[in-house]
Amino acid sequence: MDRLKMGLWSGFVLGLALALSACQMAVPTPATATKAAPREIRLSSSGLAVAGPTGFCIDPGSVKDEQGGSFVLLGSCTGLSGGSNLGRKASTAVLTLSVSGPLTDATPFDAAGVQAFFVSDAGRTVLSRSGNMATVTLLGSAIEGGTVFVHARDTSAPMINGLDDEYWRAFFVSGGRLMTATATPFSQAPMSSEGLKTALKQFAGVLARKNPT
């Protein structure tokens, strides 16, 4: 693998490491009654705007905004505002976004190379929350509009108790940084795989519109 591609893979590993660090996070904390959960924030480290599809808000306690990389978790506005999600779990999910530090090379995003990488043992290791490729089953992948979508199952401990082990993840570059967006359903009443992918595509679409390159 040449130097330019190695720089890109390093960005992937860093971005995914930030997502894995969220494994230690607590369950999202509802906003106070006097302050609703925000629908959009701007990351000061990168200038990138983060917002989700309709019905999703940002968990302020999840935000890590650092020059070397950032992380944001989004959940249903109802749940984050102190309401009950019990009747909505099959129609909602938890969305996360990891943003890498600035990519050192101006290499165009190689979507086909990225897709091929995640079929490899090294790619499955990166996809695993525990760093163990044996926990990951790759269920499918696709390239749409220059974005790589990966459908996988990871039997590692969940990021938050109550989340399913199946997820959809999207990889793309915006503002010279690797963006890693993930949609994970609830285990007790999981959103369908197609619904999950749709939610992720909507999330990626919002991010792209908010951050034109």
Image (cartoon, rainbow, N blue to C red):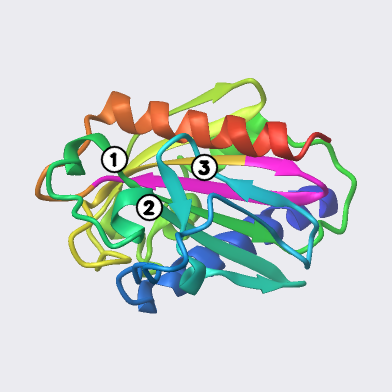
State whether residue 201 is above or below residue 190.
above
Which quadrant would the C terminus be assigned to in this image? top right
In magenta, the rendered stretch is 172-185
Judging by the rendered image, the residue that carries numbered circle 3 is 52
Instruction: Left or right? Give the position of 45 relative to 171.
Output: right
- Element on which disc 2 rests: strand
Q: Between disc 3 and disc 1, whose residue precedes? A: 3
**Could you tell me which residue is drawn at 71 percent across and 38 percent down?**
210
Classify mark 1: residues with Cα within 10 Å, few (<14), some (14-19) or many (20+): many
Q: Using the image, tell me which numbered label, if any, was put on residue 115.
A: none
Question: Residue 73: x percent and y percent?
Answer: 46, 59
Q: Which x, y percent locates residue 146?
A: 67, 26
Task: For mark 1, give the secondary structure.
Answer: loop
Q: CA distance from mark 3 to mark 1?
A: 12 Å
Q: Is residue 181 magenta?
A: yes
Q: Is residue 140 visible?
A: no
Q: Is residue 135 above or below residue 29?
A: above
Amino acid type at image mark 3: Gly
Q: Which residue position is annotated with label 1?
A: 92
Image x and y of residue 205, in percent? 60, 30
At a point 39% along the width and 71% down the height, the residue shown is 32
Q: Position of residue 135 (x, y in %)?
A: 27, 58
Residue with the mark numbered 2: 75
- Of the image marks 1 and 2, the number of the one nearer the N terminus: 2
